Image: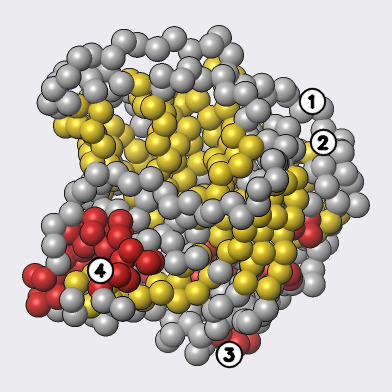
Amino acid sequence: MNRREFLGYSALGALVLSTTGGMGFALSRQYPHSATPAVLAALPEGGLALQPLPRIVNLSDAAGHFQSTLTPAAHAVPLHDELEARLWLYNGKVLPLIEVREGDELDITLSNELSHETTVHWHGVPVPQAQDGAPWDAVVPGESRQYRYTLPEGSAGLHWFHPHPHHGTARQIAHGLAGALLVRPAQDVLPAEVEEHLLMVSDLRLDVEGEVAAHTAEDWMNGREGELLLVNGQREPRLDVAPGTTLRLRLVNACAGRYLRLRLEQHELTLIGTDGGLIERPQPLEELLLTPGERADLLVRVSERADGRFLLASHPYERGWMGARPPHLDQVAPLLSIHTLNAGVFPAISLPERLGRVAPLGEPDVYRQVELTEVMPDHNDHGMEHDAPHAAHEGGGSGSRHGSHDPGAGHADHGASQGGDARPEVDFLINGRAFAMDEILFEGQVGEVEEWEVFNNSHMDHPFHVHGTHFQVIATRDADGEWREAPWLAWKDTINLVPYQRMKLRMVFREPGDWLFHCHIIEHEELGMMATIRVN
């Protein structure tokens, strides 16, 4: 098979043609030992037209039934005649899309062609616990597993899917395994004139041989940030629109650790939806912080000026970095270039008075406390926590259980598969405990309103994610401040907490089973900042 045939067959042309233009610049500036000058000089220019996410094909002819297979496997992606990037992809596609509607039945068979066990976690989708893709339901190499569930009313929104195996999630996501799941509502409330684009943001780091580079100690401590920042598998793609066009930009932050502080030059952003779908009324924003795992639904009316160029970019954000600081943390990272054509101006579009429905959950039946901490024994130079957590906890979570998982055992189990990754001696904990597969931190009841006070008792940001439900942020309290009520409600499954911040979250679990909650910086989750609630 020649190179042209391979590109057509693998459906990876967008990655090959559009990411490589910036690869040399990014690698040489931020990771000077990642690639040789000869490789960098051979890479072509990028900045091509924004491509839609490649689709997973529905193999069913039955109405309301989406049936297909997801096959994670290793794939070689040509970068030029002498270099290939070796990634792990679903069905040979970079960031594939599954599109369904509320009420549809999703019937997906995972066929594992990796040499490691894996799962598919349906992030943000209300599924029965057996379909969640949790680490205790891992599929070993060469085996398959069926995920089958119906998408209920109220599940409309932009969700995503990714692996969630025990002690393997970080490496699999670093190799490119992720996809988008778009659930359309039974009836869309937005006018048809709105131009919609899905933007799935990921990042990637390669070594000089085209292999995904092993994790560094800084990756494990901070969350991995690859030097190639990609949108739909492309580096800084271009979107051409008529002046005055109203764009709906639906974003997923699929990065393991990178925070996206989003601004669009000379434009105001309007938030219309979050993780769980549309909010009630549009919220104007000058910028948006999108943390790992989060989604956002934005409207932008593009400038009426013809022949304009406006950059959607991620600006520097300080989240408490530990260790050697890469230069890109202090640089503006381009995502998408929006160009206005020399054409007639599109008129402004009127929105309905109310977009979605976010009914308050009411007074809680159960109160819980959740504390996020970091412990690095005998290392005082990283600003880590050293004292045992001091807050009162329930459900078996009181007191310090530092080391309740066995980091040494984890290293032994996965040292070879991690390709030389050097995990530091650091614990990321919830209520003083590191995650263990057989431990239950809380127990609850189906249908009860729960209020969790989540406390980030650490020096760095943590995005907090809950499986099996969505929650409402009721109030926040900064380190030395007073409680502030949330100005408006939204359905969320991932929310960021800055250092020493507290949040009150209310939620209801509708399905029984064991549900995870964790930091969505993937490396922190894997190093212990994850726990389980059993819902009866």
Nearer the N terminus, badge 3 or badge 4?
4
Secondary structure under badge 3? helix
In the rendering, at what x and y percent does residue 239 appear? 26, 37
Label 4 sits on what residue type? Arg
Determine which residue is flagged by label 3. 412
Q: Is residue 458 left or right of residue 346?
A: right
Label 1 sits on what residue type? Gly
Nearer the N terminus, badge 2 or badge 1?
1
Residue visible at 66% across and 21% down? 357
Find out whether the residues at labels 4 and 2 contact each other: C-beta distance under 8 Å.
no
Residue visible at 54% across and 79% down? 114
Find out whether the residues at labels 3 and 4 contact each other: C-beta distance under 8 Å.
no
Determine which residue is flagged by label 2. 449
Q: In this view, does 406 lie to the left or right of 487?
A: right
Occupied quadrant, residue 198? top left
Determine which residue is flagged by label 4. 4
Distance between the alpha carbons at the discs numbered 2 and 1: 8 Å
Q: How many labels does the image show?
A: 4
Nearer the N terminus, badge 2 or badge 3?
3
